[in-house]
Amino acid sequence: MIAGVVLAIVASGCSSATENSVTQASHPVKVEKLAMKPLANDFNLAGTLQASNEANVSFEADGRILNTMVEVGDSVEKGSVLAKLDTSAYQLQLDRAKATMEKAKAGVSQAEASVQSAQAGIHSSQSQVNAAQSKLQELNNGAKKQEIAQSQNAVTVATNNYNKKKADAARSQSLFQAGAVSLTENENAQLELTNAQESLSDAQEKLSLLLAGASQEQRAQASAGVDQARAGLESARATRQQGIASKAQAQATYEDALAAYEQSSLSLKKATLTSPITGVVIEKKISDGQLGSSGSEAFVVGNIKTLKVLLPVPDSEILSWKKNQKVNMSLYDEIRTGTVTQIYPSTNSKTGSINVEVSIPNPELNWKPGQVISASKSMNQNEALLVPVEAVISTENDPYVFKVVNGKAVKAAIKLGKVTNNLLEVVSGLQAGDQIVTQGAGTLFNGDLIGNDVLGKSEESSE
């Protein structure tokens, strides 16, 4: 293949040099000095551009589409409104759910009030139990010595008072009969005697009760009072438990109503379709007035400020690809530098190639998803002597070049290796530092003088 390339380039030049050597030998030539250069392998691939991040946006609710807010090509931010459904049914559902929730909330408050009232009843009943138990305890314990002493003292005072009133009444009766006092004064003296007698009787009876202790009937009545107070306490506790159960039921009803309200609120929000990402509207699949359904695709939104392409790399070459490597991407006459972002872990089942994902900047948005681009990647390997294709002449598969030695063109046979970027690898026959004719070699003969009439001279071979 190399010999064929060389022959095709220089065949006509060689024939001309044979026929008219004197004239051609005087034509200007270009001489370059050889140097070791990296030997490169080129990979030329093609792929289809895609948005770096793409989202299919679908409705999550049913309803008629009232408004579509964007068109294909519009830029949108994350959260931007894309379309709206008719929300009248969802709003009515939300209002009903709110009313139910408020009613359930009032039921919770009422149940709470019942629990608090029952708690107050428990405190009151407990106080009554304590009072009844205290009274019963007093009856069971009997009168205290201090109480008996006080009662005896009261009897003594009442007795003294009775004796005095009795003497006063007798004297008043005598004076009345003698006409010394009036009827009224005598009657008052007799009344005071009666009152003193009653007070004495009361004091004596109290003392008698204290000395005798409580009767069986009194103890039974006090015990019955304790039982009644305890029953009231148990009833108050039962009422509280019932109130707690009612509160729990009311709370559960409220939570159900709250969940229904939140669900209705979410359904209302879902009636507004928003973009999940920042990007450009790539496709629009709906129109105003049509029915939208949950799960039906409405828009395709993608980020095309950065594009990506999947390159099908032969598996035999995949080891030469690394993450973060740079790749030249070409679309028509424009070339951009992409970056390898991902190397897929498995081969394509149909082609056996391995996908390499390359990220490409697209700040002007002038490259579009769906366009087919070509990609080239050079991988530097070992260094070699590289000469331009036009410097090599081949006859019967024996390539040679003209070295410049002491101002003369000297034919030098060479052995060629790989072809890369219009350059031929020289395996043998030349070494770094040699000067060769890189342009005009086809007009030369072995031994021709290379004078000052040279097209250009460089210290080292150009790329």
Image (tube, grey):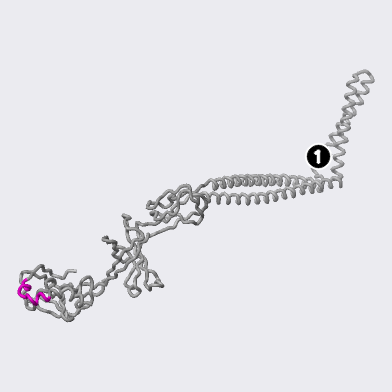
* 365 horizontally vs 175: left or right: left
Query: Viewer-proximal residue, 179 or 214?
Result: 214
On the image, the x and y values in percent for residue 125 come to 73, 46
Residue 8 colored in magenta in the image: no
On the image, the x and y values in percent for residue 251 come to 63, 50
Query: Viewer-proximal residue, 206 or 381?
Result: 381
Tally the marks: 1
Looking at the figure, which quarter contains the N terminus? Answer: bottom left
Residue 435 seen from this side: no
Q: Quadrant of residue 431?
A: bottom left
Element assignment for label 1: helix
What residue does disc 1 label? 150
Q: Quadrant of residue 10?
A: bottom left
On the image, the x and y values in percent for residue 314 come to 34, 73
Looking at the figure, which quarter contains the C terminus? Answer: bottom left
Amino acid beneath label 1: Gln
* 319 horizontally vs 58: left or right: left
Q: Quadrant of residue 331?
A: bottom left
Crowding around mark 1 (Cα neighbors within 10 Å: few <14, some 14 to 19, many 20+) is few
On the image, the x and y values in percent for residue 252 come to 63, 52
Magenta segment main secondary structure: helix
Query: Viewer-proximal residue, 81 or 169?
Result: 81
Residue furthest toward the top? 179
Residue 15 colored in magenta in the image: yes
Which contiguous range is marked in magenta? 14-26
Residue 87 seen from this side: yes
